[in-house]
Image (cartoon, grey):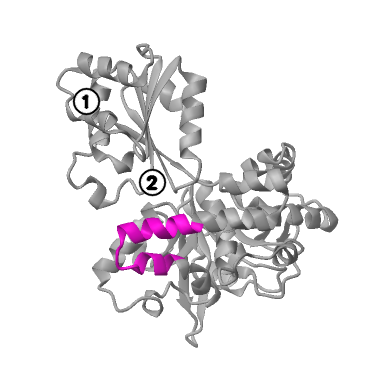
Amino acid sequence: MLQWKQESQGETALLIEGARRVGKSTLVRQFAQNEYKSFALFDFSKASKDEKALFEDLSDMNLFFNRLRLLKGITLYERETAIIFDEVQKYPVARQAIKALVEDGRYDYIEAGSLISIHKNVESIIIPSEEDMLEMYPLDYEEFLWALGNESTMDLLHEAWQKKRGFGDAVNRKLMRDFRLYMLVGGMPQAVSKYIDTKDLSAVDKVKRGIIRLYRNDFQKIDKTGKATALFMAIPSQLTSNANRFQPSTIINKTRAEQLDDLVFMMQDSKTVNVCYHANDPNVGLDLFANRSAYKMFIADTGLFVTLAFWDKDFTENVIYQKLLNDSLKANLGYVYENMVAQMLVAAGNQLFYYTFPDENRHLYEVDFLLSRRAKICPVEVKSEGYNTHRSLDEFCKKHASRIGNRYLVYTKDLRKDKETSLVPVYMTGLL
C-alpha cells in the first residue's frame, strides 16, 4: 500500500479485494490515519441517501468536493487526503466515479470490498481502468505469530531454510504444536483476537461459526438456487473422499456446465475459497494448461475449514480442539494439512495446480501441488504424518525428469533430505 501511494501519486486508485471479515476495513482506515493528513470514509453498507447522491453528478468537481466537505465535516488537503470507499461493491455508481475522481488528481482514493467482480454488481457501470488491485488474505503464519507477540520464530525458520538444517525432533515437536494452534484458530482477525483475549478455543469456534454463517448468507443472496452454498459447505467432505477432483454432481442436482463454471468463478472471486486446477501438461506456464472443469476446492482459511469439518455439532467442544492440538485425534487429518498447504501457498503468491496420471495398471498417481519456478516445475506432495514412501512424487519426477527443479514432500517431521527430495515441515511451506 505504501508502494502504491509513493509510486502512483494519485494517478490510480487502490482496490483492496478480500473475503468478508478478513480485515479490509480496519486496514484501510489505519493506513489512512497513519499516512494522510485527513481522510473521508464512505461505508456503502450503511451509507445515507445524501452520501450516495453525492456521486450521481460529477460534472462540477469543485461543487462535488464542497459538498463532500460539508457532508463529512472535514478539511481536504490536496495530495494529503485519502477518500475511502468501503464495501464499494454495494454501490457500483461510486466505483464508476473513480475514473473522473482520479483524473481530477487532487486526492487519493482507496476502495475495499468483497465479491467485487461479480457480473451482476457491475453490469450497468463502466469499470474504471484507473485501479491498482491488491488481494488481502487471512493472516499468514508469520502474521499470526506477530499477533501472539512472537517475533523470533520466523527468523529462525528462515535461517534454518537457508542453511538447509533442521532443528532436531524435540524442537520440531514444539514447533508443530505451535503451528497446529494456527491451523485451529486460523487467520481471520476476529478469531485471532478472540483467542488472544480468552485463550478459549470454543469461544474462537463460535466466532468462526458466525463468519461461516455470514458467508452462507452472502452466497444465498447472490445465488438464490442455494447451489453455491451447498458446494461451499461440502468442501471438507469432498477432500476427505480422496477423489482426484471436486465432484459437484454428488452435492447438487444436475447443473449445466456453463452455470457450474459461473458458480465456481463466483466462489473463487469471493476469496472465501482457493481453487486448485488440474494441469493437463505439467510445464512452465501452468495456467496455459489448466483444465477448468477438473479442480479441487479449499477453504481460504484453515481455521474456518476445521470448524466446517465439525459443523454437525452445535459447537466444536474443547476436547476435540485439544486432541487436534496434541495431534491425538484418531481421524485422518491429511485433508486439514492439504487445506493448510494450499492456504500458505496462495498467501505466498502462488496459483494452485495439481496433476494426476495413470500407471500401466491404470492406478492413478497424484501430485498435490505444482509450483512454477523459473524454467522448472517443483512438485509438492503433502503428508499428514511421517513418510515411508512418496511414490507419486517419485514417478512424476521420472516421467518428467527434464522439467523438474526442486521436489518437496511437506509433512510434520523435521527438515531433512531423502535423496533428491526435500522433506519440509509444514510450518515452512511459505518458504518454498
Q: Residue 426 in magenta?
A: no
Residue 242 visible? The answer is yes
Compared to 349, does 287 lie above or below? below
Q: Which residues are magenta?
A: 212-232
Q: Residues within 10 Å of mark 1 (few under 14, many from 20)?
A: some
Q: Disc 1 to disc 2, how far (Cα)?
A: 23 Å
Label 1 secondary element: helix
Determine the residue positioned at 75% across, 56% down: 177
Tell me the amino acid under the disc marked 1: Ala
Question: What secondary structure predominates along the stretch shown in magenta?
Answer: helix
Name the disc covering residue 114, or none: 2
Residue 268 place in picture, x, y as percent: 39, 56
- Tell me the residue that label 1 is attached to: 100
Q: Nearer the viewer, residue 397 or 183?
A: 183
Closer-to-camera residue (4/78) = 78
- Tell whether 368 sits left or right of 153: left
Q: Are marks 1 and 2 in contact (CB under 8 Å)?
A: no
